[in-house]
Amino acid sequence: MVRADLEGRVQTILLAIVEHYIHSGEPVGSRTLAKLMHLGVSAATIRNVMADLTEQGYLEQPHTSAGRTPTDLAYRYYVDAHLTPTDVPEATRRTIEESILDAPAGLESLLASTTRLLAELTEFTGVVASPMIRATRLKKVEFLRIGPEEVYVVLITQSNMVHHKILRVTQELGQEFLNSVSRYLNDQFTSRSLAEIRGHVLESLMEEKEQYDQLLAHVVRLSKRAFDLSQERELYVEGQFNIVKDLQDLGRVRGLLQALESKFAIIELLDAALNGSIMNEAGIGVSIGQENALECLEDCALVTARYGSGTDSLGTIGVIGPTRMDYTRIVPIIGYTAKVLSRAIGIRAPG
């Protein structure tokens, strides 16, 4: 458990150790710290404080004669107690805005550009999960007859994602009739979430079929399949090998690369960040070391932020880097990137 009541001098020493290690990557000794901090206390006093912090689980000593390094607990204290919102440098803000707002049309291109940008700006691994389809809202749905027993469905969301599938039907449906089904759904459900629409359709299935005329009966049957929410999500990844240089455990490197390749486990992590309690009021979350559910991420930190359209949270962006990442630089970049991405989605979505 992270203590919030570390005494002033102890807190100052701990934060100095974390910052020194983040920037140097070298274990910190008491003499080095005494020279850096100018606290007016001896190296012996600092050494005693470091010993206490080691006993409390905030520091560890890689070798008997070496200095101390921060543990996950120390990084968590640093992020929770010390990290304050800072402005993203003007040049970086311009880069983010130009890269995202000028990205090619289409949400897929927008998310891919954002992922590349995250990897380039942070020099870590950028990850972006496509919107949770349950959270997306309907812009338009169309049913097109392509064969005697085949109907092609095109579903467009408010965030301009396009989903399509072919449905096999048991009886021939004319295009004029399918147009009327499309009009009915668009009139009734435009701007409602796909989860709400799906719930309404399933609720309707429970009612007596005799209540429906031909149109409504077909609407219910076609909608149940058209709004099936089980389709695979997309994970955009860039800079997979950026993290390799920071990890010593080859087994975890291999596991992380496999997780990024298979996508499912990383998407679950990003969805958990979106729906869970690790995000602060600004919609930014930091998971450090063993706080991550995947063993391959136990030497890593995952910084995430929500993106959305209007008041709807659609998905998550983030970076995977070493636990000794520069949180004061990385966290504001992730937050600002998510904000610009959300603005871009809002601009491209209908008003």
Image (cartoon, helix red, strand yellow):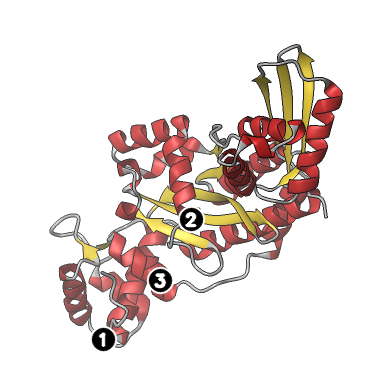
Residue nearer the viewer, 71 or 50: 71
Q: Looking at the picture, how far across and down is residue 63, in whole percent? A: 16, 55
Residue nearer the viewer, 110 or 191: 191
Please state, as top left, top right, bottom left or bottom right, where the N terminus lies in the image: bottom left
Can you tell which of label 1 and label 3 is closer to the viewer?
3
Mark 2 and mark 1: span between their CA atoms?
Answer: 46 Å
Mark 1 and mark 3: span between their CA atoms?
Answer: 27 Å
The residue that appears at 67% across and 30% down in the rendered structure is 222
Residue at the farthest front position: 210
Query: What label does residue 41 carry, if any?
Result: 1
Horizontal side of residue 295 vs 227, given as left or right: left
Mark 2 and mark 3: span between their CA atoms?
Answer: 20 Å
Question: Splitting the image into 4 quarters, where does residue 80 fall?
Answer: bottom left
Residue kind at label 3, given as amino acid type: Asp
Q: In the rendered view, tell whether residue 177 sits above or below residue 62.
A: above
Residue kind at label 1, given as amino acid type: Val
User: What residue is disc 3 on?
Assistant: 80
> Of marks 2 and 3, which one's residue comes earlier in the chain?
3
- Badge 1 crowding class, 10 Å Cα cut-off, few under 14, some 14 to 19, many 20 or more, is few
Secondary element at image label 3: helix
Secondary element at image label 1: loop
Q: Are marks 2 and 1 in contact (CB under 8 Å)?
A: no
Can you tell which of label 2 and label 3 is closer to the viewer?
2
User: What residue is disc 2 on?
Assistant: 275
> Of marks 2 and 1, which one's residue comes earlier in the chain?
1
Secondary element at image label 2: helix
Residue kind at label 2, given as amino acid type: Asn
Q: Looking at the picture, how far across and down is residue 145, in whole percent? A: 79, 19
Query: What label does residue 144 carry, if any?
Result: none
Question: Splitting the image into 4 quarters, where does residue 278 fall?
Answer: bottom left
The residue that appears at 35% across and 65% down in the rendered structure is 76
Residue 120 seen in this snapshot: no
